[in-house]
Amino acid sequence: MAVDFRWSKSLGEFEIDWARKGDEWVQRIHKYFADVRGCAGFGLRRGGDIGEFIELRVGAGEGQLDTRLLILPKTESVVNLWICGTGEAEAELDVTVWTAAVSEALEGLREPHKVHEWTAIIGTLPSKMGDRVVKMGDPCDIAEIRFSSTERIFREPWRVNASLSSWKIYDSVPILVRGRSSGYDWQHVQKDAAENLNRLVGLLSVAWGFFVDVREAAAPLELGERYAPDVSPWMSESMHGESRSVSTVDVLEVPDWINGAWQRLKRQKRLDAAIGMYMEGVRVQDEHDSLALVSFVAVVEAISLSLFHEQRCPGCKGHLNIGAKFRETLKLVLSPDEAEELNRVYSSRSKTVHTGRLYGGESSPGAFAFSFFEKSTEIEFSHQMVQRMKNVARNLLQMALRGDLPGKSHYEAAPAAAS
């Protein structure tokens, strides 16, 4: 049993939902030692000659305890616990302390979680398709989140692609988000806060048609409320200029379907994933058109999966009629002729995914050629195909979020034309 240890003592098997509660349990052990022994440090070691294990060690005073807690996962919900030491003989006092720490930590897992309040900043970002300045209208509440306009102009320099010396000035009106998440400590709730922020910016981006993203990540309120300055901290005074008045900025109201949409995202993992994929497309669109198209096509495919029952080939088990279902989904927001025309992007998407083909300006960063006589396939792809597919993805997501999609049905291929 020894792994750099001279003795070991088994504490037996314990039921712990390791995937969900393991980190909290370890942190509770740490807290026990901090409260009872005033430990100065805490460490982990994983793996070894005996197989997968986790070793907990604590420091006390000027040194470390010469005993360790060894955790050997047996199943997803059961672990074996051993106390091991480097001394000549078993340290009874340390064994007693470790045993008490383990027991109290296990008991603590049954306690209700603390509610953590947090704040964050979200806001619009510029894109090559436009940098119109807008602001949020009335404050809004969604579940445990409240968000409202800061009613302040935030001015920042924005990098021009492929240039170290060129920039443009972008004004925005940030949005303050206040939220609440439940968990043992901030380490365990910050992921929930971050995921909710990503859902929120996704919903607003789809609702408004602007690029809304997280500008200041969620932080616990106890550290102070997130704050948006008037100008970017690294922006020189010579660049400040005269900022516009917030009263002159166009106002966007949060649609009344937003709360119902939030509940659908929480219930429907596929729709939640589609919103996330839409945001990925928006985030990369300016510099990576082909990858943006992959994202927007994936959104349409995800919507199609909620419209048509799954069909698989009896032999190879592959999905059937994927392209046809994609085309039928387009027809929910396009005319048949428009759907047929835009359907050709499916081939472009497939070549990007399977052969690495790029269609936009990714291969020639910084170059922009315009001609009255020669058609630019890169500009056509970026400004027409990708942007049109983005609009289609957004319109379909709006339908899904409002609950306006038709019910699920079986796809029936059109009969072959007679020869």
Image: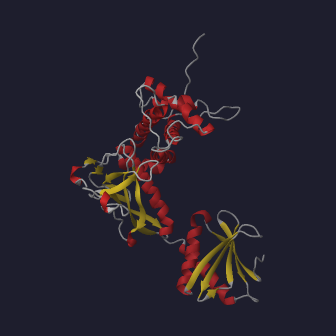
Residue 194 lies, with reference to residue 283, above or below; the image says below
Question: Of residues 360 and 60, which is closer to you in this image?
Answer: 360
How many circles with numbers are drawn on the protein?
Answer: 0
Question: Of residues 156 and 334, which is closer to you in this image?
Answer: 156
Estimate the x, y position of residue 281 in percent, counting from the top left: 48, 44
Residue 173 lies, with reference to residue 367, above or below; the image says below
Query: Which image quarter: residue 225?
Result: bottom left
Estimate the x, y position of residue 299 in percent, counting from the top left: 49, 40
Query: Which image quarter: residue 74?
Result: bottom right
Residue 248 visible to the viewer = yes
Give the quadrant of the C terminus. top right
Give the quadrant of the N terminus. bottom right
Question: Of residues 247 and 305, which is closer to you in this image?
Answer: 247
Residue 410 visible to the viewer = no
Estimate the x, y position of residue 52 in percent, counting from the top left: 72, 67
The residue positioned 24% from the left and 53% from the top of the image is 244
Residue furthest toward the front? 165
The residue positioned 32% from the left and 53% from the top of the image is 172
Estimate the x, y position of residue 387 in percent, counting from the top left: 43, 37
The residue positioned 68% from the left and 85% from the top of the image is 66
Residue 22 lies, with reference to residue 398, above or below; the image says below
Residue 137 lies, with reference to residue 60, above or below; the image says above
Q: Is residue 21 left or right of residue 331?
A: right
